[in-house]
Image (cartoon, rainbow, N blue to C red):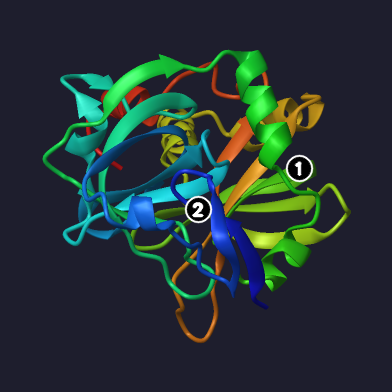
Amino acid sequence: MAVTQINCIACGNRLPVPIISNAGQLCNTCRGQGLFRKQIIITGITRMNSGNVCVSGIDPQTWNFVRPVFATGIDRDFLMQGTTQVVNHFNLVEIEFRRYKPDQTFHTEDWIINENFAPRFIKHLSNEEILNVVNRISINNLNNAIEKQDKSLFIVKARSIGRIWHEQYERLKVLINFVDADGNLYQRVPVTDLLTMAFVIYQIKNGNTDYSNQIIRQFNASPNRFVRIGLTRLWRGEHWKQVTALITIPDLFDGKSFSYYESKLGGQL
């Protein structure tokens, strides 16, 4: 279902003429300017194949989701400055972009980045700032939002997590059941969030068999609880849901990063 685009996807300025499309539109100024830098609030870091990661966040200028991409994939070194993880949840970072490259449906958030420009850390958002961001952009009903086919990234207000657990295949897989604010149940949704996965693996390695109840108890007790969802590229005829972050304010993971847990585990997931 196409929607009416009124503002430029990059700068937020009003377009001369509204355009009906699923993919976001650029104004003439942004289309012609080449390399430019934008500040992004990081909200997702997920595991991909071949050791790469997928990074995405929110442009606080336009309040659109942005997914930085380049052809060879983003490796973990891109997230780091020495041993410090610069690209981390709710860090504001500056990234240099080459051009906007949306799909016509769902994956309208893709931007080709300049891989030669290292992300520049600006600041970590305060709890109050994080709450303002997620309340502004979050949705109550994931099913209704997906039907529009104009996004592949969502922050969903959650009523509760019902279950979170792991299964062992060629590599460990974490799954979750949750209910959105409107009462819709989503079952066996894979968790690809590197932070949640690193936390779970760390608990397993340390013999904590109660990690599931611990996460459920803390998440459901939080007055501010959200599940961040990303849709996969088309695979077997469907765009599959994945949990790309568990968000609570205060933070469920006490501000720790996936690299913190990986350092404790002695290697990458």
Residue 83: numbered disc: none
Residue 207 or residue 229, whichever sits in front: 229
Separation of residues labelled 1 and 2 (CA atoms) = 27 Å
Q: Position of residue 15 (x, y in %)?
A: 54, 57
Circle 1 SS class:
strand
Write the residue at 31% across / 20% down.
Answer: 121
- 160 with respect to 262 (left or right): right
Q: Are marks 1 and 2 in contact (CB under 8 Å)?
A: no
- 95 with respect to 228 (left or right): left
Residue projecting furthest to the left: 116
Write the residue at 36% across / 51% down.
Answer: 29
* Picture layout, residue 60 above or below residue 64: above
Question: Quadrant of the rendered structure where residue 138 is?
Answer: top right
Q: Is residue 191 visible?
A: yes
Q: Position of residue 191 (x, y in %)?
A: 52, 51
Circle 2 SS class:
loop
Write the residue at 80% across / 59% down.
Answer: 185
Write the residue at 71% across / 36% down.
Answer: 136
* Picture layout, residue 191 above or below residue 269: below
Q: Residues within 10 Å of mark 2 (few under 14, many from 20)?
A: many
Question: Quadrant of the rendered structure where residue 256 is?
Answer: top left
- Residue topped by disc 1: 157
* Identity, as a three-letter code, of the amino acid under mark 1: Lys
Q: Position of residue 235 (x, y in %)?
A: 45, 79
- Residue topped by disc 2: 8
Q: Quadrant of the N terminus?
A: bottom right
Residue projecting furthest to the right: 183
Q: Earlier in the sequence, mark 1 or mark 2?
A: 2
* Identity, as a three-letter code, of the amino acid under mark 2: Cys
* Picture layout, residue 192 above or below residue 219: below
- 64 with respect to 169 (left or right): right
